[in-house]
Amino acid sequence: MHTNTRYWTPADGDAGLNEAAAALAAGGVVAFPTETVYGLGADARSDAAAERIFAAKGRPSDNPLIVHLADAADVEALAAEVSPLERTLMAAFWPGPLTLVLPVRQDAVAARVTAGLDTVAVRVPAHETARRLIAAAGCPVAAPSANRSGRPSPTLASHVRDDLDGRIDGVLDGGPTGVGVESTVVRVLGGDVHILRPGGVTAEQLRAAAGEAARVVVAGAEAAAGDGDAAGAADSPGAASAIDAAGADAAAVGAPGAPRSPGVKYAHYAPQGVMAIASGAPEAVRAAVQAAVDDARRRGEPAGVLCCDEHAGFYSADAVIALGPRAAPAAAAQALYAALRECDARGLRFIAAEAFPEEGIGAALMNRMRKAAGGRTLPV
Ligand code: TXA
Ligand code: MG
């Protein structure tokens, strides 16, 4: 497969955006910025266009895509029905990083997009460029994260180029994304809001918006989360065991009848090096991280650290990557995926990471860090 990939920068202005929209309308695949991560878009009504997303990413075909809309009112054309609680969530969080899984209206979306399920995942991105692009394309836009399967989601247009140059029709560069981790995926069932994947909208925010009558169910979110992107089962024994671990988790925590995201059975991105997380009191964490790095270096492995800004000066390692202030998980969420790409670029064989507090978006941050670490922890 080789396609001549076009790059539009903000300097190309409306002309660039309109060319990108025309490529989408013609059945092409184009990467674009959202407030979470870059998405790889295609006309959600077209099986052929959606197929090109799966081919470019190397994504397993039974994992459905999120459909992006320019306007919340457009949901009526895609969903067979929308409950009052779902409308409340849309009003509270759209445009924004919340994805709702809704019963799909017959023939509104290509079967390739829903992976043949009777539901469709929908969101309205809070990114001006994204919404203008979708509106100009004149179609609902199916878009997973614009990375090769098995790589971290892209938070810069250069990440998309590194992964997909020559495999897609174009990249609309809108600068760095804001949130840095993907949207929160929820399904409303029986009056409860089930979090299938933690993300940019926090459980606390959902609770506040849903009100007293509704429960927000986070249990099992860990296992059910599933990034869309699998490291293929056949890739390595490591990938296979990560899949087993995820499956076991799901079985252990999933309540009977609880909704699942198809992503559950796939391993998430893991860096090329072995990653492990230390959590606990800051001083003990620092000692544990440095000890693990020293061990790795004695084994001859290039070793790095992912840590809070406050601790960056403390460590001696082959790479020390500060993610942000300890009390600001939003900054760390924004920085995480680029940091994981840097670990691979620097050839690290071992990565010791400090845990961040799990409040607010810290829950999504730690969900992605634990997945990258394959659940490995350091003794503290
Ligand atoms: O922030 C985001 O959500 C980004 C940007 C580009 O919008 N997109 C994204 O897409 O993360 P992706 O494909 O990497 O992740 C989609 C997740 C997967 O876990 C998938 O299994 C789940 O949503 N999903 C999609 N359709 C679903 C459905 N009908 N039922 C349950 N889960 C669904
Ligand atoms: Mg993804």
Image (cartoon, grey):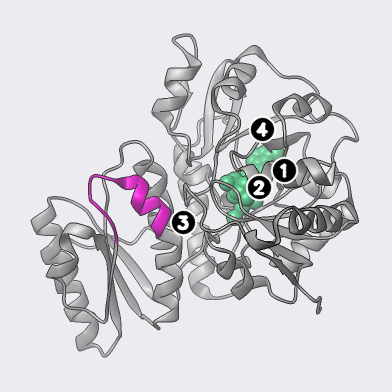
Q: Residue farthest to the top? A: 213
SS label for mark 1: helix
SS label for mark 2: helix
As measured in the structure, the alpha-carbon distance from the residue carrying label 1 to the one carrying label 2 is 5 Å
SS label for mark 4: strand
Can residue 268 be seen in the rendering of this structure? yes
As measured in the structure, the alpha-carbon distance from the residue carrying label 1 to the one carrying label 3 is 41 Å
Crowd band around label 2 with a 10 angstrom C-alpha radius: few (<14), some (14–19), many (20+): many
Q: Which label number is shown at residue 40?
A: none
Circle 4: residue type: Val
Residue with the mark numbered 2? 129
As measured in the structure, the alpha-carbon distance from the residue carrying label 3 to the one carrying label 4 is 25 Å
Residue with the mark numbered 1? 132
SS label for mark 3: helix
- Asked whether 223 falls inside the magenta stretch, the response is no
Q: Which label number is shown at residue 101?
A: 4
Residue with the mark numbered 3? 245
Write the residue at 40% across / 83% down. Answer: 347
Task: Give the mark, 3 or 4, whose residue is nearer the N terminus.
Answer: 4
